Amino acid sequence: MAYRDLILLLHPIIVIVVVYPLIGIVINRALQVRHRRLQVATEGKSKIQPVVGQEHVKVGGWLAISVFGITLLALANGIFGKIADNQVWSKMPFQVLLIVVLFGVTIAAFFFLHKARHNTWRAIFAILSGMGLVVLGCQDGVYRQTDRWYISHYYYGIVAALLMIISVAIVQTIYKDRSNRWRKVHIILNIAALLLFLGQGITGARSLLEISLNWQEPYVQQLYEQQCETKPCKVEALLTPSSH
């Protein structure tokens, strides 16, 4: 198995080992926080410790970092794999440099988003992080399946990552808002993210079957070209997932 295939498998491995367990912990802590709040409101006290709220925020931050990280990993695998295959660095070195800089800026923006305390700066870094993911996702080599965007693993993942960025950006505001408006927004966004994570489990398994391993690609391409000899068809570049 080639190193690119191993890198490709890192994405689902990290999701299974890290992300989905964190999702379970975050949901558990969120339910405990809500149960404690209701008990205090009705009974004046609760057996659930107040620290559960801090745990929910902390694990939620780890989840956001994990989702952001594996999204960048998947994008980097596709983009730099395409660059290596076509030797883009020798033809368009400035474009490659811009992509590397964009990765760095996106990571830096997400890092400072976690450190920022003022709402304005949090909004700025959230926008920069989100824009970085979207622009990187538009590069050649990314397996997007735009023609089937409604069941695309890429689009589910990008939207889920953007929702994680928004959740990090508004977490400070939630605890300052006495009207609970931002808390409701937070709940709605994360329910949507949970549904996307469930969808990603399905679409991700399908994508692993659709993306050929490195040693399989020449044979898949040959079979496709043979099929096109028997009937008219448009020969798609199977080795460039961005064409799908």
Image (spheres, rainbow, N blue to C red):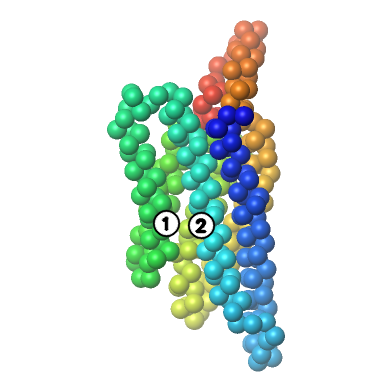
Which of 140/2 is in front? 2
What kind of element bears circle 2? helix
Whole-percent x, y for residue 1 in the image: 62, 29
For the point 61% across and 39% down, the residue is 9
For the point 63% across and 70% down, the residue is 30
In the image, is residue 166 above or below residue 130? below
Q: CB atoms at circles 1 and 2 under 8 Å apart?
A: yes
Number of residues whose C-alpha sits closer than 10 Å to that of mark 2, classed few (under 14), some (14–19) or many (20 or more): many
What kind of element bears circle 1? helix
Q: Quadrant of the C terminus?
A: top right
Name the residue carrying label 2.
65
Which of 58/237 is in front? 58
Q: CA distance from mark 1 to mark 2?
A: 9 Å
Q: Amino acid at mark 1?
A: Phe
Whole-percent x, y for residue 173 in the image: 45, 73
Name the residue carrying label 1.
110
Whole-percent x, y for residue 39 in the image: 68, 85
Q: Which badge, 1 or 2, is on the more N-terminal residue? A: 2
Q: Amino acid at mark 2?
A: Ile
Whole-percent x, y for residue 162 in the image: 49, 54
- Residue 199 visible (yes or no): no
Q: Residue 61's mark?
A: none
Which of 64/131 is in front? 64
Q: Quadrant of residue 44?
A: bottom right
